[in-house]
Image: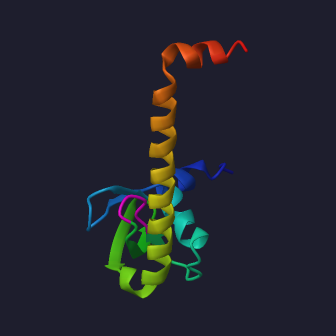
Amino acid sequence: MGSGDWLMNALDQNAVCTKCGAVINSQSESVLLPKKIGITDSGVLMCVKCKSVFTYHLVPGRLTLIENVSSKYKANIEKVKSNSEDANIEKVKSNSEDAKEGFFKKLFKKWQ
């Protein structure tokens, strides 16, 4: 009897987002993200770059994006886009505040 690794590897497939061209993987955040933002339907993947939602068909060796169904989940998508924009704004603010401190101040702060 085999371990089943061959099946896991055969189901680890990529497709290209038809909207932005990013790689969508069948065993990555693309599978988890729809659930995280409240999409309860099964059988959808989300592009982590542009947040488009697709129905898909997965068989060993092939992942096919069937239809862009983003319009059905517009409220969910807007929610995740605004959250990621807020996070990016906070990250930029944090980075600019760190830059103001200067190299030596940050360096010596480690030994205080």
- Residue 101 seen: yes
Q: Is residue 28 above or below residue 94?
A: below
The colour scheme used here is: rainbow
Say which of 30 and 15 sits in front: 30
- Residue 26 seen: no
The x and y percentages for residue 15 are 34, 60
- At x 55% / y 56%, what residue is drawn? 7
- At x 51% / y 50%, what residue is drawn? 90
Say which of 79 and 57 sits in front: 79
Q: Main secondary structure of the magenta part?
A: loop
Left or right of 53? Residue 97 is right
Say which of 85 and 13 sits in front: 85
Q: Is residue 105 above or below residue 73?
A: above
Question: Which residues are drawn in magenta?
Answer: 46-50
Say which of 41 and 38 sits in front: 38
Residue farthest to the right, as pictured: 112
- At x 42% / y 56%, what residue is drawn? 13
The x and y percentages for residue 35 are 59, 72
Task: Give the quarter of the figure containing the C terminus.
Answer: top right
- At x 46% / y 69%, what residue is drawn? 45
Look at the image and say whether residue 49 sits in the magenta stretch.
yes
The x and y percentages for residue 39 are 55, 79
Q: Is residue 17 above or below residue 112?
A: below
Q: Is residue 20 above or below residue 99?
A: below
The x and y percentages for residue 66 are 34, 77
Q: Which of the 4 image quadrants contains residue 14?
A: bottom left
Left or right of 17? Residue 98 is right
Look at the image and say whether residue 9 sits in the magenta stretch.
no
Please state the total of marks drawn on the protein image.
0
